[in-house]
Amino acid sequence: MKNRLFYFAACVALVLSSVSCSSDDGEEEDADIPVVGKIAVSGAYNVYSHGSQGWIEADKIGIYVLSDGKPQENLPYAPSEVAVATTTELDGKTYIVYDRDSRVTEDITLNPSSELAAGFKGGDHTIYAYTPYNAASQDYKAVALPNLAVQEYYESEFMPHRNYSFAYASATTSSYSAATVSLGEFKPLFSQITLPGAGCPDSFVGKKFTKVVVSCDHPIAYEDGATVDLSTGKISGTPINSITYNLPNGGFEITAGYFGASLETKTSGQITLLDREAFYPGDEGVVEIAFLIRRALGDNFSEGTKFTFGEGRKHVGEGEVKEILELE
């Protein structure tokens, strides 16, 4: 009987202490609920602008947990597996690439990267996560966003720099469980814009492009200082109608009427891989290309025509026309 009375008294004390307590100045403040076990979380990051390799070593994640008691705010996490980065040389320049056999595109465990780890308390638990991590973002309703108003060109990678990316995910779980809580696929908050080469008058040859300004008749970005509410995806900040993209080393020289091009003409096209899922440096294969602008191909475009292609100004490969499927 004594044991039962002691147990009952302990439960009452615990419930009372979870309701309120008093500070030194006599004011009541909310008390926390102790963590009773760690929450294991997982997620996948397969966003086009981030690359086809999935998680990489540079990816850092922030996690918030809302439940009974005080929220667990902006806990730093990292992927348990990452794609292996290597370097390759093209035209005397070094680029970062990722080994195809080490791609991490599946849902994998995310591990705490400090002593702070998400834990179970009481009631339902809502988990919000985002990447890249920002240590100053302590409120899940006001997570700092990267500044997209002015962007810099990063020459070493074949994708937009992660400084200008942002993705988020969420999940809900209830009582304590040893099972991993999957956040699913992280969703991008921004979209990548790919621009074809810019046409210029012949009088521009020898001059340089120092920046590219993309403008629109409605907002396409926000001024520096914008935030996002992870529970709704709503962005707060000052919207702007243009983005400035600065080019390095004093700009790119205009040659033959196009900046950074070694050919007289340059156009964008959609490449369809016919016998593989991805192309990597050193690979050879047959692909199908749908060009965006017919007139940019010139009058001598035919079977046997040799061409080069690239990502923006970067020369990444060369090819030869084997068959023309349609030419209007």
Image (cartoon, rainbow, N blue to C red):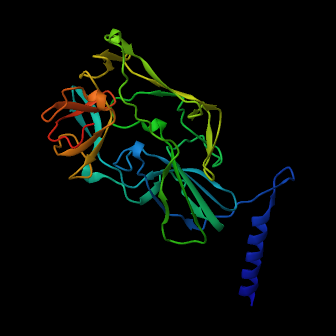
Q: Position of residue 257 (x, y in %)?
A: 31, 17
Please determine whether, in this image, residue 326 is positioned above or below residue 249.
Answer: below
Residue 150 to residue 138: above or below: above
Residue at the far front: name it.
328
Name which residue lies at 54% across and 57% down: 117
299 relative to 257 in the view: left or right:
left
The structure residue drawn at horizontal position 41% and vertical position 42%, both measured from the top left corner, is 49
Q: Name the spot of residue 263 as percent of width and height, x first.
A: 24, 23
- x, y (%) of residue 204? 35, 11
Looking at the image, the residue that sits furthest to the top is: 203
Residue at image x 80%, y 62%?
A: 20
Residue drawn at x 23%, y 52% as measured from the top left: 276
Q: Is residue 174 left or right of residue 164?
A: right
Within the image, what quadrant is residue 305 found in? top left
Q: Nearer the viewer, residue 62 or 237?
A: 237
Q: Looking at the picture, how far across and down is residue 60, in whole percent?
A: 46, 46
> In the rendered image, which quarter contains the C terminus?
top left
Q: Nearer the viewer, residue 89 or 256?
A: 256
Q: Is residue 295 visible from the viewing direction of this image? A: yes
Dividing the picture into quadrants, the one containing residue 143 is top right
- Residue 283 placement, left or right of 97: left
Question: Of residues 93 and 111, which is closer to you in this image?
Answer: 93
Q: Residue furthest bottom?
A: 1
Can residue 99 be seen at all in this image of the molecule? no
| Residue at the outermost right position | 26
Instruction: Point out the image quarter for the N terminus.
Output: bottom right
In this rendering, the count of numbered labels is 0
